[in-house]
Image (spheres, grey):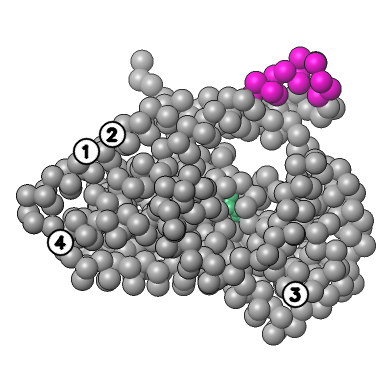
Amino acid sequence: MKRLALHWQILAALVLATLTGVVFRTLFDGQAPDGTLVAKALGLSQFIGDLFMQALKMIIVPLIVTSVISGIASLQGVKGFGRLGAKTFGFYAMSSLVAVVTGLLLVNLIQPGLVDGEPNEVIRQAFDTKAAEATDAERAKVAAANAKEPKDFLDTIKLMVPENVFSAATNNGQMLGVIVFSLLFAIAITRLPAAEMKTLKEFFQAGNDVMITVTRWIMAISPIGVYALMFPVIFKNGPDVFAEMAKYFGTVLAALGIHLLITLPLVLSFIAKVSPRAHFKAMREALLLAFSTASSSGTLPVTMRCVQDNAGVSKRTASFTLPLGATVNMDGTALYECVAVVFVAQVMGIQMGFGEQFVVVTAALLTSIGVAGVPSASLVAILLILKNSNVPNAETAVVALLAVDRLLDMARTAVNVFGDSCAAVVIAKSEGERVLEDAPA
Ligand code: ASP
């Protein structure tokens, strides 16, 4: 019998986790007191989910290093590199800007934080209740972010030149330093005498092949990992999460939907001249994984594989655009930050004029560059922008948003990953590569 394709297996795991999560939630009223069977099942699920996430994260550093070095060392010197860099950054800046503006338009149009033009008191109270119900870990996370000196754009630039590349590699938030170091290393390889250059290129190419094989192994167990990640999420987040904030959830999801299903497909059709449907098909596994893990960094190995194996983007383009994209390009996150900040301001009775909203847009664009590709990372940036805009009770609001963040996080992470993959395709096409030509439309 033919084995079910992996993306169907992952989808089946998602559906099964949702069904069993809902059944268990209904049976046990969403409660799992210590020592009960359901608490043990949740614990086991969490454990397996953590193992799966760790396995994905385990391969990120060696994968980035080997793929960036082997991909870039094959470029024709620094000239080709500069062109690729300019195109990539240009695309990332433009697509994030369009995403943020989409979010801004919708949040102003729908006004999820107001009723009849007045701040919504029910949501304000819901903020307090949800903040009070938040777990200690959630509260501690926001408190720590609140106490920290804000990281600005210059700090992000500083991360590009780590004092110690090994400590940057061990610190999740500093992947940018690892990428820049690998780029330098790769460019330096192209300056070596031919024999040495060949040895190093082959070494890193072989290393990269090894990492791709390990990625395949990890992906083979991804349906189990996805089930384990999703089951506790569904168990813990009942429909009551959406009750007061339905309009806010609707606004975020609609804006993300427009970016994912209209804006980016238009870019694919008109700029790259490829079939958006074929590209969605090529990216199925990565999209499902991004959705289930809410981590674009964790999804990176699979994004790279889908973009190269299914969409047909060359290693040189994929290895430049994607690791960088997973670190600095987050369309969904930038859009979300903008909607969340304006929403909280509406609830708190702060009227944001054009000038203030312009500041929010700029801040969302700049901070999304520094947000790590891990679950709920953007909440820290949202707190920063709210404080910067002098919105009162920012900390309570952010704790409340964090408590109900998972679904929105899953959705924006999928958009983040899809945005990166579109950049890879557009840039590959502009470099004359034959992308998605053999894929069925
Ligand atoms: N979870 C998102 C990602 O990994 C980041 C965020 O918006 O919180 O891309």
Coordinates of residue 192 in the picture (x, y in percent): 13, 57
C-alpha distance separating marks 1 and 2 = 6 Å
Residue 30 on the magenta span? no
Coordinates of residue 125 in the picture (x, y in percent): 92, 56
Residue bearing mark 1: 206
Confirm if mark 1 falls within 8 A of ligand 1: no
Dot placed on the residue nearer the N-terminal end, 4 or 3 = 4
Residue bearing mark 3: 389
Q: Residue at x 62, y 25 (%)?
A: 47
Circles 1, 2 touching at the beta carbon (< 8 Å): yes
Q: Residue at x 72, y 18 (%)?
A: 40
Q: Amino acid at mark 3?
A: Ser
Residue bearing mark 2: 210
Mark sitting on residue 61: none
C-alpha distance separating marks 2 and 3 = 48 Å
Secondary structure beneath label 4: loop
Dot placed on the residue nearer the N-terminal end, 1 or 4 = 4
Q: Residue at x 28, y 34 (%)?
A: 210
